[in-house]
Amino acid sequence: MVRFGDLRCRQGLMAAWPLVQPHLDQLSPEDLSDAIWAASSIPKPPSEVVRDLGRAASFLAPRLRELPADELPQRLYRCLYGLARLSGPSHCQDFRRRAEKMLEEVLQSRGPCPWLPSQLVRLLWSLGRLGCKEAKIFDALEPRLRDVSSEFSDRELEALYGILTDLHLFDQWQLIHDVERAMEARHESKPGDPNKAPRKSQFRRKWTRANPMTHSAAPRSASRRRFCTSTVTAASMQSWPGLV
């Protein structure tokens, strides 16, 4: 399934999922995390698959500590981001709470950050999308994001600013200020081609999987009310290329 997920092969994933679904409660923590990541890659996933992923997360939640320590950061990232892309299936809140605590421990540990800058942006978006309200986890993420603020692409900076404002993370005002200054500096250094006429309308896709570039970081019920005012909207951004 993981291979089909990496290839975004809907036909292969849909053929493999019925073989995995009846045995979710028997899978190892590693296999459960792989199943969540792979199934979350299904384009336009059926509602029953989304429901099953919520069950998989509930089975994995009490066994998160059993994941290999050297693989833990990436497996946490893949599970959180995978569930967030599906707008948070039901029954995954216990998983989110347990994952938050483990995520906080990793973020506060010494040494280099185990995630790429783009993955840090997606982690922040995922936590908001899944309904996280714990200030501690956002406080732990802030210094890691500030350390790599110069490494974000222009689109990642815009996405990060949209996430911070969507979630009203005003305690992270220093990070918001750093992002604003970086965006202004890059805008001034790239004035654009005066001979090129602006595009009348952006390219649009009929369907785009939820991601930080196209969807609000606020939980789904709240995002519907504020989506039209979000800095990062589907009308103004295209989806990211391949996932890391």
Image (tube, rainbow, N blue to C red):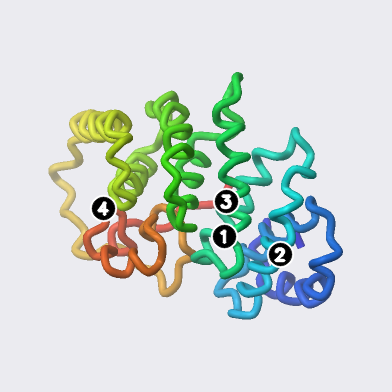
Ranked by sequence position, the earlier of labels 2 and 4 is 2
- State the separation of the CA atoms marked 3 and 4: 28 Å
- State the separation of the CA atoms marked 1 and 3: 6 Å
What residue does disc 3 label?
Answer: 97
Label 4 Cα neighbours within 10 Å, binned few <14 / some 14-19 / many ≥20: many
Q: Residue furthest left?
A: 194
73 vs 225: above or below: above
What residue does disc 4 label?
Answer: 231
What residue does disc 2 label?
Answer: 56
Label 2 Cα neighbours within 10 Å, binned few <14 / some 14-19 / many ≥20: many
142 vs 67: above or below: above
Q: Quadrant of the N terminus?
A: bottom right
Label 1 Cα neighbours within 10 Å, binned few <14 / some 14-19 / many ≥20: some
For the residue labelled by badge 3, is the local secondary structure a helix, a strand or a loop?
A: helix
Hey, which quadrant is residue 232 in on the image?
Answer: bottom left
- State the separation of the CA atoms marked 2 and 4: 33 Å
